[in-house]
Image: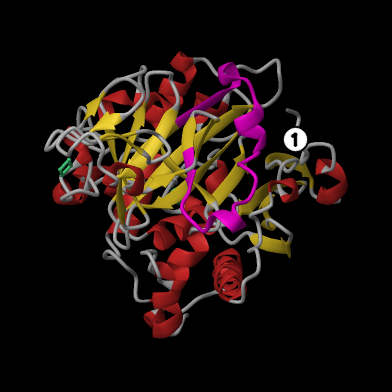
Amino acid sequence: MLSREDNERITRVGPGTPGGNLFRRYWMPACLTSELGQPDDPPVRVRLLGEDLIAFRDSKGRPALLDAYCPHRRAPMFYGRNEDCGLRCVYHGWKFDLNGDCVDMPSEPADTPLKAKVKIRSFPVVDCGGIIWTYMGPRDTMPPPPDHEWTRAPATHRHVTKTFEDCNYLQALEGGLDTAHSSFAHNNAIHDPKELRNADKSPSIEIERTDYGYWYASTRKIGPDRKWIKYYNYIMPTMQARGGITAISGGHNDVPKIDGHIWVPIDDETCHVYNWALGYDENTPLTPEYMEEFSAFTGRGKDDHIPGTFKLIRNKANDYLIDRKLQKEKTYTGITGLNTQDYALQEGMGQIVDRSQEFLGTSDRAIVTMRRLMLEAIDEVAQGRMPRGSDPTTYRNVRAHDEIIPADADWRGALAGEIVAKF
Ligand code: FES
Ligand SMILES: [Fe+2]
């Protein structure tokens, strides 16, 4: 449970809010690299942390991120012309480069001093791991750019997609960190004794705070002599990494990999989920065919989207095409698609959950710890300190892993060689 006041602090992300100030101390995904296309391609709308922005790739191929509105009379830069290393507002022709400098002001006299004075807001960007990241906070506190194992890996070994989710980021992030729900929401065969999700429905959870956030490990008993360890990383502010194993989900985890999400606030009431995956080692590339099969299994394959958008066809407006017969006979949810199941539950809570009304149990420890860390970090920023997880050296070598080991084995020893980066 959270007080109403803390719930406000942690869920609101706009400029000048305590939570918004925290997010503005990290590099955040603005869009996929692929969205920007080729040099001088049309600009792309970005809405991030409650602010409207415009991204484009200039003539030299450099990514840029500017305010969505022209500083002259606030015309939309989305209709702008991407030409010769800058974006030209088509209302009166003022043109801005990627630094936000006005490089042409044809509607004013040639010697106008205004041109040197006027700037459009511009944001630093880096292109890594298939994502254009930006930093929206004060320049003097800008940390080094992201350095995750999956952003360092060759493009052949990683895969990144993006999905729109119609709720506040926090309830979506909480769903990701919540290991216990997979026995229910994601159980695709509730009567099948071979389905691992039926083996132990109340996993024990160990958590340890780190300089980047925390790691946590869940243990499920699998019969009398084995146990299933899931070792995860939570990297602040909103990234999670998980291991993948062969034994669950039919053939869909037959390529060993690490995967996870970053939940990125669009504004207070919606978010984008960046879904990333990394092949286990240099011998494990992730082919586009395999990743499409995996994405389809999770409910966000190519055919699952409203064409030309990041929105799913199964959505709140059509009750996620719930199948009540399937629900009676085979699954708890009756909803097809692993992440569709998540979205139905998280979006169905309403845009922003009122956490003063909940009752938390022992299986919610990872969620409680994340909330504490976020609220502490909000205070740290308010006191002028760098928040946990903003320094990439704290997380660059971590890795998540899943393994089934003998019931009497010490999981720390058994997993020691697996929970460090291989790229
Ligand atoms: S509003 Fe953009 S140039 Fe006038
Ligand atoms: Fe889930």
Q: Position of residue 246 (x, y in %)?
A: 62, 29
Find the residue positioned furthest to the front: 111
Question: In the picture provided, is 47 more to the left or to the right than 76?
Answer: right
Residue shown at 30% from the left, 65% from the top: 349
Question: Is 134 colored magenta in this rendering?
Answer: yes
> Which image quadrant shows ligand 1?
top left
Give the SS element for disc 1: loop
Residue shown at 32% from the left, 68% from the top: 352
Residue shown at 38% from the left, 68% from the top: 12
Tell me if residue 68 can be seen. yes
Q: Amino acid at mark 1?
A: Ala
Residue placed most toward the observer, 291 or 90: 90
Q: Position of residue 30 (x, y in %)?
A: 41, 42
Residue placed most toward the observer, 262 or 142: 142
Q: Position of residue 269 (x, y in %)?
A: 29, 61
Find the residue positioned furthest to the left: 91
268 relative to 287, above or below = below
Question: Is 82 colored magenta in this rendering?
Answer: no
